[in-house]
């Protein structure tokens, strides 16, 4: 998710496999089942067809045009699409049915799949999460090379902002990609560790919201809290990562974050590109 993310934050809809329930007779609403049911119905609600997806794309371009130029709005939307494409490629590699990519104005994008039909290991879930920012790095590298060869300032700005979008998604805040990676790592240590990791992740998000006052973070935290509730009620039977895989996953996370930072520092002297880096420093 990009929130930006964003997906920033960018996210995949992993909770679609939750079992839906109903109402307990004489005891009020079963809120756990109701929330799980909403997650199960979400993909069906998103079956809006190609015209609907195009409308969301157009709405996103229009929304970002209010913040940037329309040319740069296209760059941002393209960055989100390629980011989500990374998740889609990983999901398809592991046999997860993919329902589509949806852009959400002022929020980012989401790659919707149905992992409930496939039993994914924690390593596979980690790979699905990291593939978005990984493809995002490749996307940022293209305008970086163009800038290096031609000195074209717009390419420098595009590289920096694409890197920023994907770096935001690496924040270890659930349900951003970084938060999903963190969950996969903690889940390999057991159910209690999973809950501790997700609470820490949401706590970090709340602290950043308090410090930065970014409304998008509030939305991300609400979604994260709901998914956390569903996760606790449902539990996880995924195969945990062995110690070597945990170390490899941590290494991949650090290297990817460093690579995205390198892109931003490489073009920091370009005015528009430098703005993205200043936002990160603030």
Image: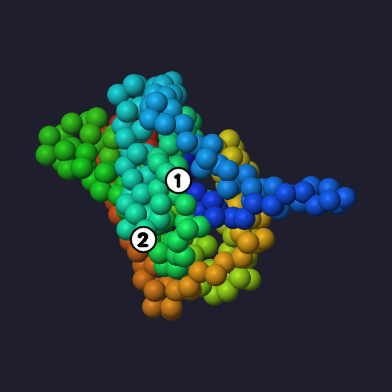
The residue at 52%/62% (across/down) is: 183
Coordinates of residue 154 in the picture (x, y in percent): 24, 30
Residue highlighted by disc 1: 112
Residue highlighted by disc 2: 94
Mark 2 or mark 1, which has the lower sequence index? 2
Coordinates of residue 116 in the picture (x, y in percent): 50, 57
Q: Quadrant of the N terminus?
A: top left
Q: CA distance from mark 2 to mark 1?
A: 14 Å
- Callout 1 secondary element: strand
- Callout 2 secondary element: loop
Seen from the viewer's position, the closer of residues 229 and 155 is 229
Q: Is residue 256 visible?
A: no
What's the colour scheme?
A: rainbow
Spot the residue most to the front: 25
Numbered circle sitting on residue 183: none
Location of residue 244 with respect to 28 vertically, above or below: below
Location of residue 77 with respect to 262 vertically, above or below: above
């Amino acid at each position: 998710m990009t929130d930006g993310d964003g997906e920033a934050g960018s996210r995949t809809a992993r909770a679609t496999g939750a079992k839906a329930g109903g109402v307990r007779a004489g005891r009020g609403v079963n809120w756990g089942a109701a929330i799980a049911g909403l997650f199960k119905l979400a993909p069906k609600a998103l079956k809006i067809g190609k015209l609907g997806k195009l409308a969301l794309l157009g709405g996103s371009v229009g929304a970002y045009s209010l913040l940037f130029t329309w040319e740069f709005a296209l760059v941002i939307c393209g960055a989100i699409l390629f980011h989500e494409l990374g998740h889609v490629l990983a999901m398809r590699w592991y046999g997860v049915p993919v329902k589509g990519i949806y852009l959400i104005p002022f929020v980012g994008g989401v790659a919707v799949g149905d992992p409930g039909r496939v039993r994914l290991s924690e390593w596979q879930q980690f790979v699905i999460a990291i593939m978005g920012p990984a493809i995002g790095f490749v996307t940022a590298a293209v305008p970086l090379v163009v800038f290096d060869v031609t000195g074209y300032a717009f390419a420098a700005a595009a590289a920096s902002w694409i890197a920023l979008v994907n770096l935001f998604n690496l924040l270890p805040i659930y349900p951003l990609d970084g938060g999903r990676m963190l969950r996969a790592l903690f889940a390999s240590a057991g159910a209690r560790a999973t809950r501790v990791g997700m609470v820490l992740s949401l706590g970090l998000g709340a602290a950043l919201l308090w410090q930065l006052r970014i409304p998008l973070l509030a939305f991300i935290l609400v979604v994260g809290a709901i998914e956390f509730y569903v996760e606790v009620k449902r539990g996880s039977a995924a195969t945990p990562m062995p110690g070597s895989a945990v170390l490899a996953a941590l290494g991949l996370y650090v290297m990817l974050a460093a690579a995205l930072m390198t892109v931003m520092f490489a073009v920091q002297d370009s005015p528009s590109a430098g703005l993205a880096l200043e936002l990160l420093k603030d």
